[in-house]
Amino acid sequence: MSEHSANPSAAAAGRPRAVKAVIPAAGLATRFLPATKAVPKELLPVVDRPVLQYIVEEAAQAGIGDILLITGRGKTSMVDHFDRRPDLEERLAEKPDLLAAVKRTEELAAIYTCRQPEQLGLGHAVGYAESHVGDEPFAVLLGDEFVKPSEPLLPAMLELQARTGGVVLAFFEVDPAETKRYGIASVEPAEAELTDIGEVVKVTGMVEKPTPEEAPSNLAVLGRYVLPGRIFDAIRRTQPGSGGEIQLTDAMELLRTEGTPVHAIVYRGTRYDTGMPLGYLQTVVQIAAEREDLGSEFRKWLAEFVNSDASGGRDT
Ligand code: UTP
């Protein structure tokens, strides 16, 4: 588990950086059925690690050592992935690389868990974190997307939240024709605030899945949030919204209309979306192609395959 200290600007504002993260992972994952009938989408492998491990690594890399996993029915195997396996470790005594890979999963962070008994929405799931998190700010990382480790997003978000004390989101730019798949924000420039990984904007509103005509921008909400503890009270006051679910977006919007500042970083780095088959495949190919141990062999095979008849890549 890694330690970190509050950064100087946050300390000047008298606010510490968030040190806990919540990973809501209780959803039904309908876009990936039937694979996800018995296997949580968070445990689908990207090369040799489950998606969830990349996400926990992203949090740990940002100095977060305390992670609450919100799980649901049939999802306890997610927690097992981070548990100790003395029997396996004993067997791997002669295989130091594998042993280190297995032990690494146990050492990334302290993992806590709680259950969302009914899937009533992302906001409802986050509400279950209240007794673990208390009044302090905390990060939320959705369990089906992650960013490239060399282009980290979370540290800048944590720092910005410590400065503003409000809600901090992250956006990525989408093709304007595709706004219907995402939560889309309306924004205005924030005064001269810059980060290494993207521009900071002030959020003036959010719309769930607008048509291109209705969309106020092409900035889509990425699955990373840093929230103040008062979000829990806002969730309690939030009525079911889109899809009959208690939406985190609606709770954040309630805070914003009551005066809580909401900022976002427009992320310019690489984001991997593993929540549905196409994005998952693209993620596996990209990560595999970049791996030091098997990347060069895989890239060579991939190039040959793409140009072969077998791939359908040639005209017939
Ligand atoms: P999604 O909208 O991606 O839903 O939820 P989903 O169930 O995971 O997948 P699809 O859309 O049916 O394919 C966003 C995040 O919120 C969590 C999910 O696990 C996911 O990480 N979530 C959603 C919950 O924890 N509980 C809920 O009731 C809803």
Image: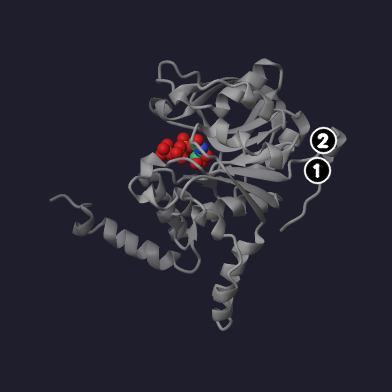
Quadrant in which residue 260 is drawn: top right
Rendered image: mark on residue 104? none
Per the model, the C-alpha gap separating discs 2 and 1 is 10 Å
Above or below — where is 82 with respect to 6?
Answer: below
- Name the residue at the bottom extreme: 94
Q: Is ligand 1 less than 8 Å from the beta carbon at label 2?
A: no
Q: Say which of marks 2 and 1 sits in front.
A: 2
Whole-percent x, y for residue 48 in the image: 47, 63
Residue of label 1 = 7
Left or right relative to 231: residue 284 = left
- Which residue is painted at 70% across and 45% down in the image? 20
Above or below — where is 226 with respect to 92?
Answer: above
Q: Earlier in the sequence, mark 2 or mark 1?
A: 1
Judging from the image, what secondary structure is the residue with disc 1 in?
Answer: loop
Residue 309 or 249: which is nearer the viewer?
Answer: 249
Three-letter residue code for mark 1: Asn
Q: How many marks?
A: 2
Above or below — where is 224 with respect to 263?
Answer: below
Judging from the image, what secondary structure is the residue with disc 2 in?
Answer: loop
Left or right relative to 58: residue 282 = left
Report if the CB atoms under discs 2 and 1 are less than 8 Å apart.
no
Residue of label 2 = 15
Whole-percent x, y for residue 308 in the image: 22, 59
Three-letter residue code for mark 2: Arg
Whole-percent x, y for residue 141 in the image: 59, 42
Q: Residues within 10 Å of mark 1 (few under 14, many from 20)?
A: some
Can see residue 22? yes
- Which residue is painted at 71% across and 30% down in the image? 193
Can see residue 171? no
Quarter holding the N terminus is bottom right
Q: Is ligand 1 less than 8 Å from the beta carbon at label 1?
A: no
